[in-house]
Image (cartoon, rainbow, N blue to C red):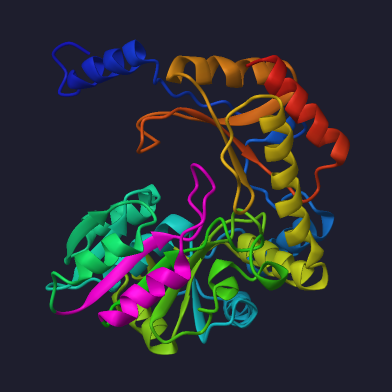
Amino acid sequence: MAGSPFAWIDEQAHQRRQAGLVRTLRPRPADSALLDLAGNDYLGLARHPEITAAAADAAHRWGGGATGSRLVSGTTELHGELERELADFCGFEAALVFSSGYAANLAAVTALAPHGSLVVSDAGNHASLIDGCRLARGATQVVAHADPDAVRKALGTHEGPAVVVSDTVFSVDGDAAPLAALATACRAHGAALLVDDAHGLGVLGEGGRGAPHAAGLAGAADVVVTVTLSKSFGSQGGAVLGPAPVIDHLVNAARTFIFDTGLAPAAAGAALAALRLLRREPARADRARAVATALHTRLTAEGLEAVRPDAAVVSVRAPSPERAVRWAADCREAGLAVGCFRPPSVPDGISRLRLTARADLTDAQIEQAVRVISENR
């Protein structure tokens, strides 16, 4: 693109190629023979007939799109029903549904960190939380990963409103944050705790009610939780859960709520059906964790370096970005889809294969996955 105002893109593309960091889109067919351990369908509900039927019914009844922002025409009775049941299930006073989990995180961080406030952010947080910190008007201090002492130290340097921001389960290695200790640190300094339970909802807590519920923080007046509907619930969208005054504040102050088109009715219908199915079948959460443990046990027995999972994500270390890409490609050729995480997506610079444990995986499929990964290392 010589002479173009975008000529600088050529140099960045060259640098990515040299570093082996080029990303490409790979459209998947409607039906695939691949065993999928790459997506985030933790409970195996994305193609469940009850969920897809609910999505189709909602689209027929309410239309293909929400037609406008939630404050104009984009709120249906279905959205309200989903919010009430989601808040009740997770143990919070109120909930607010967004078009994505990313939008929910941007809303929560920016609306709860005004001028003069401090945001204390874990170094391992998801990109959506990081972007929320960048957009917030308060000052941000990044602290060591999963370190309550570092949080206490950061809070001790500030007088005024403060919020501590963390994933509950980190998406790269699948390790859990020390939520109880973080809450104690926050309360010692009068700070709020904002956690993203994208990888905990549906997997952790009683019947899949999430990591905050498991830590005894559900419904606390100083705790706000964000979730996604696109993982355990097999749908799309996100939500913020917390005290009713906080949710009312988001309705009036969160830009990704006020100015974004509402969640499509089909996605809201699918998520509500998934929530109701999980209430009836709470053992799905137990099974997802059991599958993750089985994958970790079998992979480490094969001599691979894998991080012990706290939820449904199993991370397997690779020696280099190039080897990780080749390893994932070889697994795909052998019939297994796995995730491939490498810099700059991983903050510690260590490349990994990322495996998703699903509640609907059979023992035979677990053995197949371990065999393919081991043989193509």
Image quadrant holding the N terminus, namely top left
Q: Is residue 87 above or below residue 7?
A: below
Count of all numbered marks drawn on residues in the image: 0
The boundaries of the magenta stretch are 160-189
Q: Residue at x 75, y 51 (%)?
A: 290
Kindly tell me whether residue 29 is visible in this rendering: no
Q: Quadrant of the C terminus?
A: top right
Q: Considering depth in this image, is 374 or 234 the residue closer to the camera?
A: 374
Residue 35 in percent (x, y) is at 76, 31
| 197 with respect to 189 (left or right) | right
Q: Position of residue 161 (x, y in %)?
A: 20, 78
Q: Residue at x 17, y 67 (%)?
A: 138
Q: x and y percent of residue 351 in the render? A: 45, 27
> Within the image, what quadrant is residue 211 found in?
bottom right
User: Does the magenta portion include 166?
Assistant: yes
The front one of 242 and 101 is 242
Which residue is painted at 68% across and 69% down in the image?
Answer: 272
Q: Could you tell me residue 221's position as x and y percent?
A: 42, 87
Q: Is residue 58 left or right of residue 214?
A: right
The reply to whether residue 319 is in sight is yes
In-image side of 363 versus 52 (left or right)? right
Q: Residue at x 42, y 78 (%)?
A: 223
